[in-house]
Image: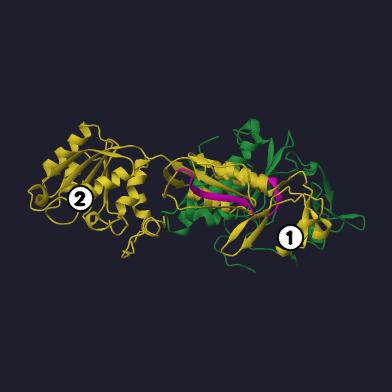
Chain colours: A green, B yellow
Amino acid sequence: MQSFETLLSKSAKAHGHLCPGQVVGVRMAILGCRLLGLDNPTSIAQIKKFLVYVEMDRCTADAVAHVTGVKLGRRSLKFMDYGIMAATFVHLETGMAFRILSTEESRDLSCVYAPEESEKRIQQLLAYKRMPDNVLFRVQKVHVEVNALDLPGPTKQKVACSRCGQVVRDGREVIHDGKPLCRPCSDNCYFSAPQEILWPDMDWTPVNGANGTTRDKGKNKSSAY
Amino acid sequence: MLKKIRVEDAVGQRLSHDITEIRPGEFKDAAFRKGHTVCDEDICHLQKLGKNHLYLIDLEKDEIHENQAASILANGLAGEGITWVDNPKEGKICLYAEHDGLLVINKANLAAFNMVDEVMCASLHSYTLVKKGQQVAATRAIPLVMKRNPVERAAAIAAQEGGTVSVHVLKDAKVGVIITGNEVFNGLVDDKFAPILKKKITDLRSHITRIELVPDNTELIQQAIETHIQNNCDLILLSGGMSVDPDDVTRKGIRNAGATEMHYGAAALPGAMFMVAYINNIPLLGVPACGLHHKVTVLDLILPRILIGERIGKKELAFIGHGGLCMDCPECTHPHCPFGKGM
């Protein structure tokens, strides 16, 4: 694994800024990998061996993902919307799983670990680098039952919604009166009142047209809706 | 797990913890020790102590008794020069100085330790001079029964960097002293600085190898420093010439002698014009004239730290600011006062 400072620098660049959450995330990822026995998590040999469940959508989550190489699109990164500064590292071969929580007291202890800094953000950033793991984190050994339909790899199951026909992958359909429904057709969906629309440049494509010119004729037209 | 029983029903049962008796201004100690078997005669005494019920303890696998917890905590907290006895009293273990020296508290460790729920440690101020056998800290687990995991985590936090509470032996340093000032060198006034510095040094069990009297002359101050270094001094103290007057050339003499690190100014009163410099890792302390007048100055805060081998730089001189104001009491009670205790 690369040095802490190198990982932090790269993670901050990918995230967009350096912040205390980045420091916590990078350290959380390093500790998680160490506990699972992964010394090079982004390598081909190790990248498919583990999953990470992040319990917050904050700077820390990006740092954990950057250092470990887990990605939503690879199904190796799972977002559990708990609002808790924690992440669980699961080894798919051994079944070992460790949940690492960022301690609340580490925030209060920043002034003790970096007393020379008065600006809160810089003080936290420096203090989180200095704190030992057992001050910055608590670790729980946990059991994670990983559903076969949650694993990385090709789609294992496809079902058509019995109401709208939408194909639903990997068992995410909802069974209602014995029939499969997609989530938008069920009562539990994050949006409501969907309406199909048409828009002016709906024939746009990013690749060049047959005559060699980019088809961008819709550009600068005012919106029709 | 704790089970509550009535005191009257406790005859024949063994006490699960010490029971403290307090008679204001007269007595505070364990009236009954853990393990004592309650007998008929104890019932009235216990009731007078306000105990109408007692706990019977049935520990779960992951639970420990406060006494066992206190031992684990003390073991983590104790660093170099600390001794303690594994015989908790009222759930508490005291840590003692194993020898004379300077108490050093790892304040980050201590703060992190005390942020763990249900454990505590209280200590004397860091950088207090202590005697062999003196109590310097105490720790306890707060509940009677607690989970083992947080106790062990707290102990691991406390054990970092060699422990949280340490007593360091003061080095017997060979100290070279340089008294600067034309008025002293030319015999216009008697030197009062050397006896003051000598007492401070010998009180800390170091010794003076030689005292040089030099005028306010950069070259001669430089030469005096070089002489002390050639004589293998571990520490050089320079008095006078630390102020802003044109005759104050001590700092220049130190620089010309090859100081690689110089920190002028300390956040303490008296002692703002104090200076710490290093030549080949040998510390040089520039003591301003306030050392002649005040019984205790910044020198008394810094000298013991130098003698345990601490490197004093800008940060260390800045951090003494909080609590670094002497109250200039008519009768000085230092070290039993706040001066230098706020770090």
In this rendering, which labeled residue sits more in front, label 2 or label 1?
Answer: 1
Q: Residue at 69% x, 38% y: name it.
A: A50
Q: Give the residue drawn at x 45%, y 40%.
A: B99
Instruction: Find the distance from the CA under tag 2 to the CA under tag 1.
Output: 62 Å
Q: Residue furthest right?
A: A178
Q: Give whichever of discs 2 and 1 has the lower sequence position.
A: 1
Residue B255 location, quadrant:
top left
Q: What mark, if any, has residue B46 been given in the picture?
A: 1
Write the start and end of the magenta stretch as one range.
Answer: B132-149
The answer to whether residue A90 is left or right of residue A218 is right
Instruction: Kindly identify the amino acid type of the residue bearing the numbered disc 2.
Output: Phe
Image disc number at residue B193: 2
- When asked about the image quadrant of residue B174, the answer is top left
Can residue B143 be found in the magenta stretch? yes
Residue B260 at what x, y percent from top left?
A: 26, 40
Q: Residues within 10 Å of mark 1 (few under 14, many from 20)?
A: many
The residue nearer to you, when weighing A100 against A46, is A100
Report if residue A59 is visible in the image.
no
